[in-house]
Image (cartoon, grey):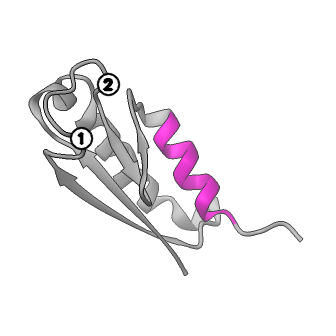
Amino acid sequence: MKKVNVEVCVCTQCVLNGAMHIIESIESLKKLKVQLRLNTQVNITTCTNLVEGTHPDISPVVRINGDLIENADSETVMERIIAMGLPAKS
């Protein structure tokens, strides 16, 4: 089973710009794994230091398996997670 590690910044700027909505979307995705045929374990962690210093111009910030997404939104994050978890086409 693949593992997808998602880190969501929950500093004030990121929360004000939608970080909590992103977390809720990922949690709902975990409930839909079977229907979407995702062979993936999604781990979510929150932190306040994904990037150095304040970052109002790029918030919310999300890191998926090491890849940083600036100005993240639920749709972009979900698309990346789903793409990582879909079975390979034969």
Q: Work out whether residue 44 or residue 7 is closer to the camera in this orientation and state it.
A: 7
Spot occupied by residue 17 in the image (x, y as percentages of width and height)? 25, 23
Spot occupied by residue 12 in the image (x, y as percentages of width and height)? 10, 29
Which amino acid, by three-letter code, is at mark 2? Ile
Q: Say if 49 sits above or below 60 in the image.
A: below
In the picture as drawn, the residue positioned furthest to the bottom comes out as 1
Residue at figure coordinates x 37%, y 49% from the top left? 63
Of pointers 2 and 1, the one earlier in the residue sequence: 1
Q: Quadrant of residue 68?
A: top left
Is disc 1 surrounded by few (<14), some (14 to 19) or many (20+) residues within 10 Å?
some
Is disc 2 surrounded by few (<14), some (14 to 19) or many (20+) residues within 10 Å?
some
Q: Say if 20 sits above or below 29 in the image.
A: above
Give the residue pinned by disc 1.
Answer: 51
Give the residue pinned by disc 2.
Answer: 58
Left or right of 81 on screen, residue 49: left
Spot occupied by residue 90 in the image (x, y as percentages of width and height)? 89, 71
Residue at figure coordinates x 30%, y 35% from the top left? 21
* Local secondary structure at mark 1: loop
Residue at figure coordinates x 47%, y 42% from the top left? 77
Q: Work out whether residue 62 or residue 86 is closer to the camera in this orientation and state it.
A: 62
**Range of residues picked out in magenta:** 76-86
Q: Work out whether residue 29 or residue 50 is closer to the camera in this orientation and state it.
A: 50
Q: Quadrant of residue 2?
A: bottom right
The N terminus: image quadrant: bottom right
The reply to whether the C-beta atoms of the residues labelled 2 and 1 are less than 8 Å apart is yes
Spot occupied by residue 24 in the image (x, y as percentages of width and height)? 31, 44
Residue at figure coordinates x 53%, y 64% from the top left? 33
